[in-house]
C-alpha cells in the first residue's frame, strides 16, 4: 500500500485509552483521504443530531496520500467534526507544516473522542503517543502555547496544532492554529477541541511516505511545478502580492463586499490592496511545506513587530466589510485573531452584523455601556472587541455566538450575511451568480473555497464564463468545481494549485504516488462521493431545502453601483436545476439511485 502508512490512531480523552487501527487499499480507494476519511468516520460513529460540544461528538485530524510528499503544496491536513456554528459538517483545512509532520509520524489520521475532565494535550513522537497535563498552558495565547510546548518537547522541529482562549471559551467560530498564523478556521472547530479540554497536539515524525515509484513520482511532480511557475497567478501574482492581489481585481469587477454587503465597491480598496501592503509592510514571503507558490506574507508593524498575514479574506473581513480604512490596524487585528484563535472571516462578519444592527437603531448604545459604538468605519471596534469575543467578556459574549445568533437575539436576521449560520466570505455574488449558488449549496455553510467559482466567472480559469450566466453549463461547472475541490482536499493539496493544474494533473500525481491506474473520471467520482456523503450527514442532522439559500439582500436588493449595478442573484432559477443535475430529488435529498451509484448504501 503506497501513499499511506495504513494506520490510524484513536484517542479517547474520557478513558485515556489509545488504540491503533488499520486501513486497507480498498478503503483508501473509496475515500482517498482527509474529507473522505473524516466523513466516513462521522457517518459511522456519531449521531448527526449530536450536540457538537458534547462528549459524543468526535474530531478527526486527517492527512491525504500526497501530504508529506514532494507534490506541490503537499502539506495540507483537514479537521473534520460536527460544527457548533452551523450544526452541520465542518471540514477546516490548513497548510503550514503540521500536516506533513503528522504524516511523517506514521499516521494517516487521528480520531479524538470523549472529553477530558482537565486540560490536556496530546504528544506524538512517531509511535509513542501520550496524553499530558495542559493546565499550565490553558488560557495562553497561541504563540505562548507553541513556545512552551516546544521547550518541553525538546525538539524544535516538532509541529503544533493548538487553540487559543477563543477555543477554550467555546466561541462558536474559534479556529485551530498551527505555525502561529496558519488556521483550520471555519465552522468553530476550535470550540470542539475546547469542549474536550484538548489544548494542543504536538507531533514529530521520522517516517517517509511510501511511494509506488519514487523516480517516476518526482518526474511527474517536477512537470507540475513547472506548470505552476509558468502560470500568471500561481507563478507571479500570488508570490508577488499574496492572496491580497485579489483586492483591486475584485473591487474593479464590482463584487468587493463593503459595509456588510451594502455595495460591491470600496472607495479605499487600493489603499489596502496587496500592492499597498507589499510597499508598506512586507518583510518576506513565507511558503507552506512543499509549496512552490509562496503566497504567505510576513509583515512588520510597529504595534506588534513581525507577524504574518492578513490574507485576502481576513484583510477584507476586518477592513472593507466594516468600512474601515486603516491598513496598519487591520494587520494588527488579524494578528490578535491569530493569537486568540479566531476565524477572521466570521469575526469580521459578526462585527459587520453588529454594525448593521447599530446603524438601524436596533442595537443601542445602552446595550454596550462605555464600549465603542458599532459605527461603520470605526477602527476602535476591531481594537476593542476581538479580545472581548475570545474571552466572552461584556458584549463579547453575545458576539461569540456568531452573527446569526446575534441578529436573531434582536429579532432582525436580515442583518446577518451568511448561509447556514456561517458568515460569508469576500465576494458579493450579485457579481458572480455561480459563486452565489456555491454559497447556497455549500455543505459547510457560507464559504468560498469548496467551489471557487470566482476562477471561471472573474479570473478565467479554466475558461472565462459570463458572471451573470445562469445556464445549465454554469451549474455543471459549479458541480465540477465542488467534486474537484473535494478530490484536491482529499489528496492533501492546496486549491491554489488549480491556478495552473487541471484534473488530469492530479490524476498523474496520485497514480504515480499510489501505483494505481485510475482515470480522471474515477478520481472525480471519489470527489462526488465525498460531497454526497457530507450532504447525507447534513440531511441526517436536520438540513432542509430552505437552508440552501442566500440572504435576502443578495436575491432581492439590486447592487446599487458599479459594474454589477442592478443585478441580483437568480438563485430560485438555478437551485432546482442544481438538484436535478446532482441526481437529487426536488427537495434536495439524495436519491436511492445516486446512493447506490456512489456505493453509499451502508451509510444511508
Image (spheres, grey):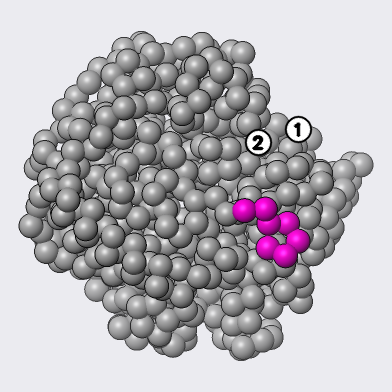
Whole-percent x, y for residue 393 in the image: 75, 32
The quarter of the picture where residue 63 lies is: top left
Above or below residue 51? Residue 317 is below
Q: Is residue 74 left or right of residue 135?
A: left
The quarter of the picture where residue 68 lies is: top left
User: In the structure shown, which secondary structural element does the residue marked by tag 1 occupy?
Assistant: loop
* Residue wearing tag 1: 393
Q: Is residue 590 left or right of residue 412?
A: left
The quarter of the picture where residue 75 lies is: top left
Q: Nearer the viewer, mark 1 or mark 2?
A: 2
First in residue order: circle 1 vs circle 2: 2
Q: Residue at horizontal 59%, vertical 57%? A: 311
Above or below residue 224? Residue 202 is above
User: In the structure shown, which secondary structural element does the residue marked by tag 2 occupy?
Assistant: helix
Q: Residue at horizontal 63%, vertical 41%? A: 338
* Residue wearing tag 2: 340
Kindly report the distance in space between the C-alpha atoms of the residues bearing marks 1 and 2: 13 Å
Whole-percent x, y for residue 389 in the image: 70, 39
Q: Magenta stretch? A: 278-284
> Which quadrant does the N terminus fall into?
top left
Amino acid at each position: 500500500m503506497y501513499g499511506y502508512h495504513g494506520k490510524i490512531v484513536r484517542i479517547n480523552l474520557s478513558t485515556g485509552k489509545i488504540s491503533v487501527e488499520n486501513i486497507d487499499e480498498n478503503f483508501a480507494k473509496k475515500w482517498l483521504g482527509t474529507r473522505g476519511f473524516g466523513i466516513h468516520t462521522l457517518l459511522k460513529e456519531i449521531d448527526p443530531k449530536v450536540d457538537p460540544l458534547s462528549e459524543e461528538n468526535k474530531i478527526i485530524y486527517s492527512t491525504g496520500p500526497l501530504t508529506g510528499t514532494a507534490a506541490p503544496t503537499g502539506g495540507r491536513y483537514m479537521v473534520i467534526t460536527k460544527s457548533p456554528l452551523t450544526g452541520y459538517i465542518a471540514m477546516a483545512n490548513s497548510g503550514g507544516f503540521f500536516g506533513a509532520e503528522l504524516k511523517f509520524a506514521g499516521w494517516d489520521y487521528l480520531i479524538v473522542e470523549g472529553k477530558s475532565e482537565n486540560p490536556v494535550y496530546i504528544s506524538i513522537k512517531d509511535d509513542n503517543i501520550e496524553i499530558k497535563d495542559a493546565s499550565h498552558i490553558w488560557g495562553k495565547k497561541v504563540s505562548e502555547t507553541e513556545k512552551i510546548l516546544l521547550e518541553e518537547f525538546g525538539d524544535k522541529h516538532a509541529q503544533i496544532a493548538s487553540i487559543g482562549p477563543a477555543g477554550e471559551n467555546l466561541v462558536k467560530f474559534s479556529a485551530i492554529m498551527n505555525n502561529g498564523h496558519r488556521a483550520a478556521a471555519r465552522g468553530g472547530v476550535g470550540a470542539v477541541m475546547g469542549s474536550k479540554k484538548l489544548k494542543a497536539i504536538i507531533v514529530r515524525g521520522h517516517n517517509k511516505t511510501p511511494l509506488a515509484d519514487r523516480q517516476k513520482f518526482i518526474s511527474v511532480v517536477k512537470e507540475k511545478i513547472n506548470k505552476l511557475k509558468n502560470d500568471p497567478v500561481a507563478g507571479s501574482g500570488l508570490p508577488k502580492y499574496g492572496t491580497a492581489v485579489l483586492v483591486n481585481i475584485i473591487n474593479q469587477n464590482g463584487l468587493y463586499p463593503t459595509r456588510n454587503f451594502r455595495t460591491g465597491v470600496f472607495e479605499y480598496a487600493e489603499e489596502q490592496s496587496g500592492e499597498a501592503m507589499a510597499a508598506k509592510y512586507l518583510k518576506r514571503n513565507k511558503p507552506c511545506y512543499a509549496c512552490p507558490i509562496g503566497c504567505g506574507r510576513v509583515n512588520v508593524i510597529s504595534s506588534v513587530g513581525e507577524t504574518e498575514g492578513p490574507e485576502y479574506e481576513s484583510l477584507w473581513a476586518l477592513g472593507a466589510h466594516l468600512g474601515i480604512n486603516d491598513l496598519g490596524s487591520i494587520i494588527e487585528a488579524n494578528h490578535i485573531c491569530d493569537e486568540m484563535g479566531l476565524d477572521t472571516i466570521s469575526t469580521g462578519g459578526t462585527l459587520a452584523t453588529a454594525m448593521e444592527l447599530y446603524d438601524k437603531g436596533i442595537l443601542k448604545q445602552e446595550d454596550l455601556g462605555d464600549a465603542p459604538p458599532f459605527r461603520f468605519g470605526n477602527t476602535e471596534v476591531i481594537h476593542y472587541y476581538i479580545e472581548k469575543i475570545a474571552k466572552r467578556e461584556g458584549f463579547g459574549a453575545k458576539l461569540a455566538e456568531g452573527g446569526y445568533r446575534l441578529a436573531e437575539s434582536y429579532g432582525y436576521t436580515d442583518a446577518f450575511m451568511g448561509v447556514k449560520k456561517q458568515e460569508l466570505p469576500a465576494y458579493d455574488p450579485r457579481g458572480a451568480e455561480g459563486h452565489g449558488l456555491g454559497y447556497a449549496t455549500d455543505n459547510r455553510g457560507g464559504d468560498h473555497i469548496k467551489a471557487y467559482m470566482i476562477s471561471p466567472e472573474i479570473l478565467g480559469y479554466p475558461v472565462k464564463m459570463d458572471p451573470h450566466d445562469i445556464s445549465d453549463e454554469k451549474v455543471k461547472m459549479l458541480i465540477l468545481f465542488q467534486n474537484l475541490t473535494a478530490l484536491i482536499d482529499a489528496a492533501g493539496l492546496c486549491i491554489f494549485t488549480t491556478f495552473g493544474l487541471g484534473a488530469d494533473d492530479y490524476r498523474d500525481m496520485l497514480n504515480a504516488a499510489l501505483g494505481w491506474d485510475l482515470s480522471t473520471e474515477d478520481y472525480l467520482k471519489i470527489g462526488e462521493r465525498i460531497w454526497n456523503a457530507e450532504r447525507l450527514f447534513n440531511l441526517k442532522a436536520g438540513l432542509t431545502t430552505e437552508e440552501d439559500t442566500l440572504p435576502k439582500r443578495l436575491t432581492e436588493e439590486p447592487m446599487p453601483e458599479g459594474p454589477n449595478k442592478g443585478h441580483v442573484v437568480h438563485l430560485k432559477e438555478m437551485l432546482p436545476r442544481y438538484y436535478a443535475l446532482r441526481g437529487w430529488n426536488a427537495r434536495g435529498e439524495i436519491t436511492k439511485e445516486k446512493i447506490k451509484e456512489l456505493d453509499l448504501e451502508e451509510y444511508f
